[in-house]
Image (cartoon, rainbow, N blue to C red):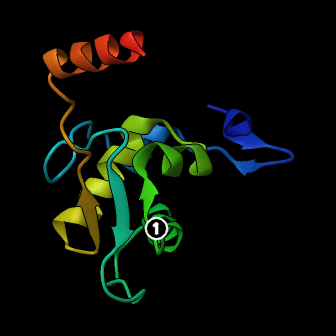
Amino acid sequence: MSDERWLDEDAGPIVPAYLLTRGRTVPASEAIDLIAVIITAGGLTPPMGLGPEHLIIMQKCTKPTRLVDVAAELNLPIGVVRVLVGDLHAQKLVQVEHPPPAPDARVLLEVISGLKAL
């Protein structure tokens, strides 16, 4: 097999996204919502053995950042970023703040009715 399909003249080596997670599709910790907020826990001195994508996530999340924004900045599929963030969360290197639950439909209907009454 030729190595030409794994090399882009401008971008350099091309690595399929599933290799970044070693084929895993489920995060190591709990499921992480698209709009969950990720923030680096503690300092930026990660343990040895983390991949470059893990390190980039830790650097980008020194300020609270939504999971979907991390995926967009890294230009990686959201499923891959979920697994990578799950790895970091399992090692307690990042905190994951889950979004609040959606309001009850009854409450939303009352708000709409109140707005229409104005």
- SS label for mark 1: loop
Task: Looking at the picture, tell me which residue is in the foreground, 28 or 63.
Answer: 63
According to the picture, the residue beneath numbered tag 1 turns out to be 61
Left or right of 80? Residue 92 is left
Left or right of 62? Residue 11 is right
Left or right of 34? Residue 3 is right
At horizontal 51% and vertical 73% (from top left) the residue drawn is: 59
At horizontal 26% and vertical 41% (from top left) the residue drawn is: 24
Q: Quadrant of the N terminus?
A: top right
At horizontal 22% and vertical 46% (from top left) the residue drawn is: 27
Residue found farthest to the front = 118
Task: Looking at the picture, tell me which residue is in the foreground, 13 or 63.
Answer: 63
Q: Residue 14, how many percent across, how many down?
A: 64, 44
Task: Looking at the picture, tell me which residue is in the foreground, 82 or 64.
Answer: 64
Left or right of 37? Residue 110 is left
At horizontal 17% and vertical 52% (from top left) the residue drawn is: 28
- Is the residue marked by circle 1 packed among few (<14), some (14-19), or many (20+) residues within 10 Å? many
